[in-house]
Amino acid sequence: MLLLHGNPTWSFVYREVIRALRDEFRCVALDYPGFGLSSPRPGYRYLPEDHTKVVTAFVDAAGLSGVTLVAQDWGGPIGLATVEQRPAAFEGLVLANTWGWPITGDLHFEVVSHLMGGPLGRELVRQFNLFVNAMIPAGHRLRKPTADEMAHYRKALGTLKRRDASAVLPRRITASHAFLAGVEAGLPDLASLPALIVWGDADFAFRAKERQRWEQIFANHHTVIVEGAGHFVQSDAPDRFAVAIRDWRLAPGGRRTSAARGDVRRKTPRES
């Protein structure tokens, strides 16, 4: 499992999922430069294109093979771009509350990109760690992040300079049109991969329409809707997130069609 995070999180967001899966799978999680415990080289721009180069180089350097990508938020386009460049290394996808195409004309995203990616938004992120202090709590709907958890997120972006990494990405939702168009153009080549779609249906960012688009792209998909979970579904409902992966990955053919357990509502490929 190669687990990729979004903004403003880091590999810490997958801690409980890794704890649940590490006895059955090799779980590899990394931080993009400037996020979490990683440091950027001088002049690093924090663009999704740059993060993709880092992840692709990491896959090469680590000699990864037989990989299942697990990606949420910005981890989606960054991870999928990596898969498109190194298809032989990957054998499956887990996509959680993410996207992989330009969002031109979608006011839901364009407004956020221009407001939070503009001068005022960037300054609020740098001065007040706005994304951590506002988005982390808002992205958890089933539980409240603990004080210790919030401290970990704040410390990872604990200085104005460290917050550059988080401040750059909102504008790139619209400004990285060429990158996202490239990701979209490569999706047909990945469409035969088995895909698990894990979706928190109480997300403030990604809606049912994004999930349905993934279901249309990947014919060999299995969807698990985690009812009431927020944007950071892997942290909001880690046990259910891990169960969804385990059931799908260990089942014959890479997915499981048995009935749901707990509060997870599953849709079989036929129903999707």
Image (cartoon, rainbow, N blue to C red):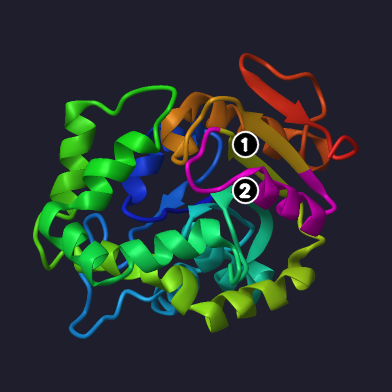
Identified at 39% across, 32% down, the residue is 140
Q: Nearer the viewer, residue 26 or 180?
A: 180
Where is residue 221 drawn, in percent x and y? 78, 46
Quadrant of image for the C terminus: top right
Where is residue 80 drawn, in percent x and y? 59, 66
Where is residue 54 drawn, in percent x and y? 40, 74
Identified at 41% across, 52% down, the residue is 29
The residue segment tinted magenta is: 202-221
Looking at the rendered structure, the secondary structure element under dot 2 is: strand
Identified at 41% across, 59% down, the residue is 112
Which is more N-terminal, label 1 or label 2?
2
Kind of residue sitting beneath label 1: Ile
The image quadrant that residue 182 belongs to is bottom right
Mark 2 vs mark 1, CA separation in Å: 8 Å
**Residue bearing the label numbered 1:** 245
Report crowding for label 2: few under 14, some 14 to 19, many 20 or more residues within 10 A (C-alpha).
many
**Considering only vertical position in the picture, is 17 above or below 164?**
above
